[in-house]
Amino acid sequence: MTWHQKETDTVLNEFGTSLKGLSADERKERLEAAGSNQLSEKEPLKAWQKIGKHFVDVLIIVLIAAGILKGLTGDYIEMAIIFAVVLINGCISYFQERKAEESLDGLKQMMGMETIILSENKQVTVDTAALVPGDIVLLRSGDVVPADLRLISTSELVIEESVLTGESVPIEKKEMMFDADVALGDRINMAFSGTLVQSGTASGVVVATGDKTELGKINAALLSVAQQTTPLIKKMTHLNKLIVKGLLVLIAFVVVFAVFRYGMEFNLLLSALIALIVAVVPEGLPAVLTMILSMGVNTMAKENAIIKHLPAVETLGAMTVICSDKTGTLTKNDMTVADVITKNGQLDTSAAVTKAEQLLLSVMSSCQDIRTDSCQKLSELSGNPTERALLMYSEPLSGDFLPAIDKLPFHSEHKFMATLHDLPDKSRCLYVKGAPEKLLAQSRLTKQERHYWQTQTDRLTKKGRRVLGFAVKPDFSGQTVEHEDVSDLQMIGLAGIIDPPKEEAIVAVEQCLQAGIAVKMITGDHKDTARAIGETLGMKHTCRVLEGSDIESMSDASLQSLVQEVDIFARTTPEQKLRIVNALQANGEIVGMTGDGVNDAPALKKADIGIAMGIKGSDVSKQAADMILADDHFATIARAVKEGRRLYDNLTKTIHFFLPSSLAQGLVVLVALLTNMPLPLSPTQVLWVNMVTTVALSYAIGFEKAARDTMTRAPRPVNEPILSGYSLFRIFYVSLLVTVPCFIVASQFEDTAVRQTVLLQGIVLSQACYMLSCRELLHPAINRNMFRNKALFISFGALFILQFFSVNTPYGNALLGTVPLSAEQQIQLILVGAILFVIVETEKMITKYLAGRKSRTKLA
Ligand code: ATP
């Protein structure tokens, strides 16, 4: 359609709408007819394709090959069991993935965007998906354009259209009409769905929604929540592949050795090799790790921290600095005007209003962005809390609203806004409001007057007030207002606004400091206001505050050395935020950075964890971030850090639990092969241990609560290897502690079935005891937290039932080739497990003591 070639009135007529917008009922009808304003998804994979994906994994191929070989040798039962395990593993992975997809869909919905429209001349916020053709949309800086719009009015509107045209240079847009058709990128009177509002404001009528938009035609996804995995899981999958490669080398060696040394029969050798393969490969581990991760991400979402990029989960645990905005994140964003200063001192609201005071109240009421019509009630208006506070103050004192002829919208870079009005006396006047120093710099004042306003500003900022100045330029002659016009102003007043810190933020700052995470406040506000708030929040270094202008004149090297000792940055611009992130990262810090504005996107992307605000954040910042705070609270970051640390601990504990089991079973088979002894465990029994008991036990570790020191220890070094030297030592000796004693007990018995059952039961009991130990990596395993993890008892219960089935029932005996054990045999095996537990606990105590001594010596 060539909407750009039509007058706005014609477009409005064709859509049966007006500048006041559609009624709610009309919108409902249109939504049913036009459908939701969403792009249709690419054809999803079919269920069988999704299940099929899980059978092409290298580990599973190895297992399938083992099963086929079993079938070729005529061992159909074992072949069936191996295939059953492959199938179960595939199904677990499929359901796991489906659950993850569902929760991602849920997250997408939580991130669902909203749009401000006019409906019967009232501003209402609606779900972007519910936009209909004919709606009148209001655009602000930072918005993602929600549908294709024919622009009706614009004010300094600049839009970046790279998603559509590939052109990353932003374009200035304005209302106009084209006589002839022009290319998409040149249609400056249109705003297209999915493009980004860099600055300015505008209103426009929706001409296309969903797939009918220009973006819909090229079908590019708007807000993608990429399905990724975390570095730890990637490393683990890589390790698994290495294990398989190592195994193949080992197999080649064993084949040569067994054939030439013992002339082993082909069938026996094959059986042993298959047992070796299924023993060493930790088949269930990737599925268990993914399960722990997706549970953690869901817990975080419930706590209002929405993870967009999965690696952020791990990075959270390694974060060393959080740089936070002030307004709304650390403070309540619940603003109240506490002081109003005129050139004669504090304004007395109980006395009659003078003419000069009337003008000040008029500027407060009219130089703003949230009210567009005098009929709109204050209670129905939403938007900038600073402006709402000023309206709440001025309205009862008869601060009349005057419609603006033109305006320069507020921009945190300029820190002021200006509106042009025709006054009741027919003269034209420019109203300006903004940061006092910006207005004072453009005002005509005597030395005495300047001193007066400066002193009043300092007095208010030192009390922690957010201060705004008000000025006018009477007898203005122009029709429009440009930046150069904001000069020769007459300063008429100041307002001091209270925005108290959030109580939870005070607690969260303390928690972060205890957890070794530095907290920095980066704000656009005045330095004294920021310092006063910083002191109330309990921030560490509040004596020195760096201002944007200081940073501007500083080299990167000086900023890098200063940034460690300064916690408060005031009057900063988004570009300076980016420099601060760079400086911190150059010092080796892992930086979390919050941001809400459109210009914060580069800093959010550069930070190790970009954190966007779910409520007040611009769509652009949400797109750039790794994590979104659904409630905009700083305290949510602290909770997410705790959850991130807990999750990482549980992933590591699970790996520490899984690997000794695999190694132990591998050792059992290898020793048997090299010494030409009969196989101590059949492949089915090995699979039972690997897939059933190990997975059932590891389930409990995923639910482990955060350890007591989670938020009192220093952040984890980010490049910590997946397995430290200590981990390898632990894995190796535990695998010996599992196999050797069980072997010794089993070797007392002549009968193969009894021997195998004893070994199987022994390994499972030892695993259960070791799992208990793995609850804590270095601390004692038996502690109060143990009773808070219900999953632990569920796991033990499940294990008891499974083992009872496998050893004590005829079905279990037939399936696994086991026999019932006597009470005496069982007690012996329980003792073996208990000894393992005591040894591991003692080793942990010694290691903890030695580690403590080492760090004490280092400190000394
Ligand atoms: P933070 O980055 O912590 O959220 P902030 O919200 O205080 O800080 P800005 O919104 O950039 O930062 O505001 C900076 C300054 O601009 C304020 O201290 C105030 O003086 C002025 N200001 C804020 N809002 C407006 C507005 N709507 N109109 C005019 N001036 C404003």
Image (spheres, rainbow, N blue to C red):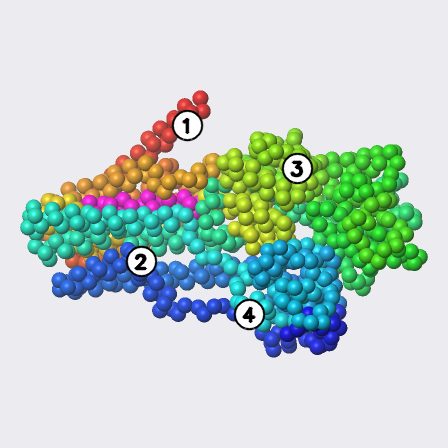
Looking at the rendered image, the disc whose residue lies closer to the viewer, 2 or 4, is 4
Sequence order check, earlier mark of 2 and 1: 2
Q: CA distance from mark 1 to mark 4?
A: 61 Å
Sequence order check, earlier mark of 2 and 3: 2
Task: Give the number of the disc on residue 855.
Answer: 1
Q: Residue furthest left?
A: 263
Q: CA distance from mark 2 to mark 3?
A: 53 Å
Mark 1 and mark 4 residues within 8 Å of each other at the beta carbon: no
- Tell me the kind of residue under disc 4: Lys
* Residue 843 visible in the snapshot: yes
Mark 2: secondary structure: loop
Q: Is residue 199 left or right of residue 802?
A: right
Q: CA distance from mark 2 to mark 4?
A: 36 Å
Q: Residue furthest top?
A: 860
- Tell me the kind of residue under disc 3: Glu
Q: On screen, 683 above or below 520?
A: below
* Image location (x, y in percent) of residue 115: 65, 62
Task: Give the number of the disc on residue 57.
Answer: 2
Magenta segment, which residues? 646-668
Give the labeled residue for mark 3. Answer: 552
Q: CA distance from mark 4 to mark 3?
A: 44 Å
Residue for point 92% across, 48% down = 354
Q: CA distance from mark 2 to mark 1?
A: 43 Å
Mark 2 and mark 1 residues within 8 Å of each other at the beta carbon: no
Residue for point 38% across, 69% down = 47
Q: Residues within 10 Å of mark 3 (few under 14, many from 20)?
A: some
